[in-house]
Image (tube, helix red, strand yellow):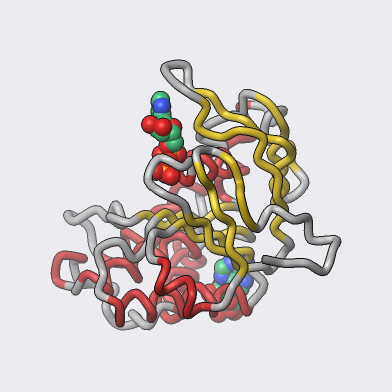
Amino acid sequence: MVRFDRVSKRYPSGNEALSGVSFELARGEMAFLTGHSGAGKSTLLKLMMRMEVPTRGEVIVDGSNLSRLREGLVPYHRRKVGVVFQNHQLLFDRSVFENVALPLLIAGTSLKETGRRVRAALDKVGLLGKEKLNPIQLSGGEQQRIGIARAVVNKPALLIADEPTGNLDPELSAEIMNLFSQFQQVGVTVLIATHDIALVERMNKRRLILQDGQMIEGHQFNSGASHV
Ligand code: ADP
Ligand code: ADP
């Protein structure tokens, strides 16, 4: 589903954020991406969303080589990737329904189909019945669930999250991680960048570790049996 082949990324202004990073994620696999602040985690996720392009190497997602993807096809690529942010980036002047419906609105989905899909997504995150509320009326954990519902409403094949539990207590964080596991169980490929090592250890999933832009663990290609 995802293949990084000797990917390096140097921002115009600075040092190399990623150096020679190679790894693969199989379809339906779930993995964590860890590493110190500045290690390159966000850069790696941005490359998968085609928000950045590599300086060297190849990023292939769902069969598309993102370095060679025509500009006009970028929006179609983005629709294949659901993204969850730490601060959930919700619109607080819109209802829960409208927040979750946003990607469908952008994609031009019909109203009827939008209603059906938004309810299905809210059901998946345990928020059915709250669609008329404003996100401000919900707890931090529930707000993060809205963000997850919005990320999956398009049924993306790939779900990526950047510190999705950064502001949550351990119990809520575990619930959010279990939600991600549930999406994995229906075939979604999931990659979660996080600082929360304790949580990662409890989840017993594959771990990719970045250090100063290099992948020091978990970079084996999946054809072999050895997973870290
Ligand atoms: P992490 O998510 O692990 O904290 P980042 O990918 O955000 O790491 O950053 C990796 C390195 O790239 C850091 O040194 C950071 O300062 C630098 N960096 C990130 N984004 C930019 C940017 N837009 N322009 C210049 N340097 C950047
Ligand atoms: P829909 O009615 O929209 O087809 P269903 O309720 O029938 O959805 O069951 C599929 C559910 O499984 C979706 O609501 C979704 O939460 C989950 N699902 C299946 N495949 C994916 C995917 N690729 N990405 C995200 N969620 C998925």
Looking at the picture, tell me which residue is in the foreground, 215 or 137: 215
Looking at the picture, tell me which residue is in the foreground, 80 or 227: 227
Q: Position of residue 152 (x, y in %)?
A: 50, 64
Is residue 55 positioned above or below 100 on the image?
above
What residue do we see at 32% from left, 59% from top?
99
Looking at the picture, tell me which residue is in the foreground, 155 or 28: 28
Picture quarter with ligand 1: top left
What residue do we see at 56% from left, 45% from top?
78
- Relative to 222, is 190 on the left or the right? left
| Quadrant housing the N terminus | bottom right
What residue do we see at 79% from left, 61% from top?
222
- Relative to 16, is 100 on the left or the right? left
Q: Position of residue 6 (x, y in %)?
A: 72, 36
Q: Position of residue 115 (x, y in %)?
A: 43, 69
The residue furthest left is 137
Is residue 41 positioned above or below 225 on the image?
above
Residue 155 visible in the picture:
no
| Quadrant housing the C terminus | bottom right
The residue furthest top is 12
What residue do we see at 40% from left, 40% from top?
38
- Relative to 135, is 13 on the left or the right? right
Q: Position of residue 13 (x, y in %)?
A: 42, 17
How many numbered marks appear? Answer: 0
The image quarter containing residue 42 is top left
Residue 162 visible in the picture:
yes
